[in-house]
Amino acid sequence: MNHFWNWIRNDAGERILRLDGPVDEDSFWGDEVTPKAFRDELEAEDGDVTVWINSPGGNVLAAAEIYNMLCDHKGSITVKIDAIAASAASVIAMAGDRILMSPVAMLMIHDPMTIAMGNTKDMERAIATLNEVKESIINAYVKKTGLTRNKVSKLMSDETWMNAKKAVELGFADEILFTGMKEPIQEGEDDGKEMQTEGRLYSARHMSETILNRICPAESEAPVTDPDETEDVEPPEGGVKPEPPEDAMPPADTLERPARENSMPVIGLDGKTSDGSMPYQILKDKLDFLR
């Protein structure tokens, strides 16, 4: 079976479920990988389970099914977020009785997405469905965090990224792995004895603009002149090829200047540069693992 999950045991004999990669990359509802197959493996034994998650997300319905199975399991569920629990994977993480994050892990929540086609009524039905799916996801986040629905809804609409410290502060996680963190050091106290992880929220819109500026630098406004590609000029009858006038030659330093030396483009709120040549899709293509 082409599973996106894997059951193992550690040296102490504890059951560990690893969710690595996209949730339901092929089909959770197909002939081979089904909810029943996951449930059979989960319920093969009672007792505590540790779930390690390193996933960019995937099918929200498959995630909801796994969330329900874990919540219904006869035993304690401990979720440990390895590197990333984004989108649908963050929903699965909320099933943990305790949620622990690596100090270098990230958790991301956002509004559900879909692809729709058809007439106006079809589009309206798609919007209504997305709204209901969002409300169902909010239920899981509110149950874990205790935040208001409006607060969670805003975080989702902003496509919010949280590091481990911020996830703990907001209630999406209970503890940070490996650090043995104590109470945060107050201002003025000696903070040299223990490193503290700074809590931050990251808006995906601002982050995408920054990344896009770095991976898609602007072309130079003035093209570089290559002496080998200049058009040949036929010499006059005297056989001597005239020298071009001084003002027709580019500055000497231009010949050696790289084509992408100019400053990075300015990205607008619509995800495009001023000339419209850098669509937001470029970033999606470059970072398609963040879905």
Image (cartoon, helix red, strand yellow):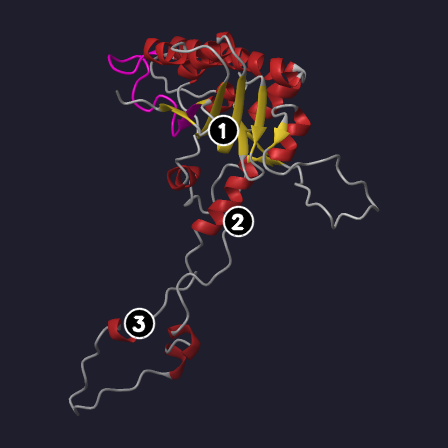
Q: Nearer the viewer, residue 147 or 95?
A: 95
The answer for how far apart the CA atoms under marks 3 and 2 are is 28 Å
Place of residue 131 in the rendered image (x, y in percent of width and height, measured from the top left): 51, 12
Q: Which mark is residue 266?
A: 2
Regarding mark 2 in the picture, which secondary structure is present there? loop
Give the residue pinned by disc 1.
85
Quadrant containing the C terminus in the rendered view: top left
Q: Start and end of the magenta stretch? A: 16-35
Residue 267 visible in image: no
Dot 1 or dot 2, earlier in sequence = 1
Quadrant where the image shows the N terminus: top left
Residue 115: x %, y % from top left:
37, 20
In the rendered image, the vertical position of residue 125 relative to residue 258, given as above or below = above
The disc, 3 or 2, on the residue closer to the chain's N-terminal end is 3
Q: Earlier in the sequence, mark 3 or mark 1?
A: 1
Identify the main secondary structure in magenta: loop
| Marker count (numbered) | 3
**Place of residue 262 in the rendered image (x, y in percent of width and height, measured from the top left):** 48, 61
Q: Is residue 198 above or below residue 33?
A: below
Is 161 placed left or right of 249 in the picture? right
Label 3 and label 1: CA atoms lie apart by 49 Å
The amino acid pointed to by label 1 is Ala
Q: Which residue is mark 3?
A: 226
Please state which of residues 8 and 40 is positioned toward the viewer in this rendering: 8
Q: Looking at the image, is mark 1 or mark 2 nearer the viewer?
A: 1
The 10 Å Cα crowd at callout 2, few under 14, some 14 to 19, many 20 or more, is some
Q: Quadrant of residue 38?
A: top left
- The answer to whether the residue labelled 3 contacts the one labelled 1, judged by CB atoms less than 8 Å apart, is no
